[in-house]
Amino acid sequence: MPTFPIPFAVFGYGTAALTYGLYLLCGFPKARNEEEQVKIKRGLIANGFAFGGIVQFTAGLVLFVFYNDIVDATTAAVFGVLWTAIWLNEYFDADPRTLTFLDIAIIVYTTFAGSWALMLGHSVVAFLLWSITALNVSLVFTHSMGRATRLKQHATQLGHPLPF
């Protein structure tokens, strides 16, 4: 029997959220030139895809197959797909506005799934889901502006990092 995968899923989500949040909102890690910026972006994409996408989706499958835990399995798998979409968007340098409706769908899902998890006695999962709701509210504004990533890259090239 495999190890209980919820800590695995939480670690994957936390790592992806921290990596993406620092990159998008703070411009961390900072690059000295355009070549270094490309290398940093590639590293961030690889880490985000591995921890956010693969780890989450694998945890969801294990929870479903071995534990028959539908709430946690669905949650982990949904976030695996979310982070895969976010990092593929970064990889292909696509317009971030395309992620806005995905962010809204995640907000709706985490709000209801958090309530469902709380009713089933999973208070930690409910708290995590509602904290993810708060994160995705900020992502809606960042992605819908469509300018955050582009402005950050442009400002970095000019040597004036933006605070987001």
Image (tube, rainbow, N blue to C red):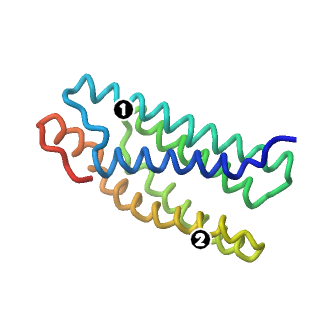
Q: Which mark is residue 57?
A: none
Residue sitting at x 31%, y 42%: 28
Alpha carbons under labels 1 and 2: distance apart: 31 Å
Horizontal and vertical percent position of residue 95 = 36, 43
Horizontal and vertical percent position of residue 99 = 45, 51
Q: Which residue is mark 2?
A: 111
- The one nearer the camera, 87 or 118, is 118
Residue extending farthest to the top is 35
162 vs 28, left or right, is left
Q: Which residue is mark 1?
A: 41
Residue extending farthest to the bottom is 119
Q: Is residue 138 above or below residue 58?
A: below
- The one nearer the camera, 59 or 106, is 59
Judge depth for marks 1 and 2 and give the one in front: 1
Q: Decide: few, some or many residues near mark 2? Use Cα within 10 Å; few <14, some 14-19, many ≥20.
A: some
Q: Is residue 20 above or below residue 35?
A: below
Residue sitting at x 51%, y 45%: 15
Horizontal and vertical percent position of residue 135 = 46, 61
Q: In what quadrant of the picture does the N terminus appear?
A: top right
Horizontal and vertical percent position of residue 144 = 35, 57
First of labels 1, 2 by sequence position: 1
Residue sitting at x 48%, y 36%: 88
Amino acid type of the residue that numbered disc 2 sits on in the rendered structure: Thr
Q: Looking at the image, how many numbered discs can be counted on the residues?
A: 2
Q: Is residue 69 above or below residue 42?
A: below
* Secondary structure found at label 1: helix
62 vs 26, left or right, is right
Q: Decide: few, some or many residues near mark 1? Use Cα within 10 Å; few <14, some 14-19, many ≥20.
A: some
Amino acid type of the residue that numbered disc 1 sits on in the rendered structure: Lys
